[in-house]
Image: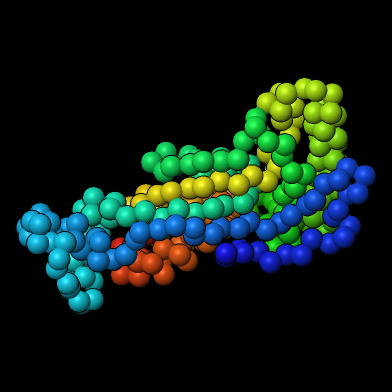
Amino acid sequence: MTSLTETAVPAADLDPDAGIELRSDITVELVDHRADDIGVVRAARVSTAGERAHQEERGDSYATGLINYLMRSRHGSPFEHNYMTFLISAPIFTVRHLMRHRTWSFNEESARYREMNPVFYVPDASRLLRQEGKPGHYQYVPGAPGDLEGVHASAQAVYGAAYREYTRMLDGGIAREIARMVLPVATYSSVYATCNARALMHFLGLRTNRPDAAYPSSPQREIELVAEGMEKEFARLMPLTHQAFEKFGRVSP
């Protein structure tokens, strides 16, 4: 498992009266895959080699040249014959950002069918808390003294009240699908997310902040943490494809 922030939650962040837990970590685990660079080469070669493409063995030099050509020319379909499945633990608002990518496949834990755990997200000390500028042209800046403590205090108060009302309704016989409406979007959820390399590259182009990208993006930090965890696995499984992605401006073909 790749733990993207190793922030210990201080004892003060646990509210024994409300029974809630505050976390700042977001985790991404690669749980299944069939993805490699030779699959991209074979998918591209079938157009000229036919059925022989599946038996061909090509060295890294040939594969690098062909993958670079495909990426530069934006021939995208050879990058679709693979899959990677990730298990993500993140606050619901981050999961909703992920689900904006509609070519992926998702299965998420359901508050309709199970009682949600009292685990909620709070930013850690590394999170930039303020934004300056106009929508679409703003930047994040550090918070003022006391901002982080204030955010934690407000969050803990609201989370505790919400979870108390949630459990009160459940204890009173209210259906889970109704009781869940009071839970905040900072509640942690778990989701399986499956994509191919082409879809993942599109996601990475939008959900990472890289000044060297052809089209720099300004994602929310929490979804960027998810993207960074996925990109580490992508680079490990398909190093030639990832290198070409970087070389040609981090644009999905």
Q: Is residue 63 something one can see in this rendering? A: yes
**Quarter of the image where one finds residue 171:** top right
**Quadrant location of the N terminus in the rendered image:** bottom right
Q: Is residue 242 left or right of residue 204?
A: left
Q: Which residue appears at 42% of the width and 38% of the height?
A: 102
Coloring applied to the structure: rainbow
Task: Farthest residue to the right: give it.
Answer: 17
Q: Residue 243 at what x, y percent from top left?
A: 34, 69
Q: Is residue 177 above or below residue 23?
A: above
Q: Image height check: is 179 above or below 147?
A: above
For this rendering, which residue is in front, 13 or 55? 55
Residue 175 percent coordinates (x, y): 73, 23
Residue drawn at the location 49% of the way across and 58% of the way down: 31
Q: How many marks?
A: 0
Is residue 57 found left or right of 99 in the rendered image?
left
| Residue 3 place in picture, x, y as percent | 62, 64
138 or 190: nearer the viewer: 190
Determine whether 31 is above or below 160 in the image.
below
Which residue lies at the image location 74% right of the left edge and 44% below the top edge?
117
**Which residue shows up at 77% across the image and 44% down it?**
118
Does residue 36 appear left or right of residue 30 in this picture? left
Q: Position of residue 60 (x, y in %)?
A: 23, 76
Using the rendered view, name the quadrant where residue 24 is placed: bottom right
- Residue 214, can we see it? no
Given residues 219 and 192, the one toward you in this image is: 192
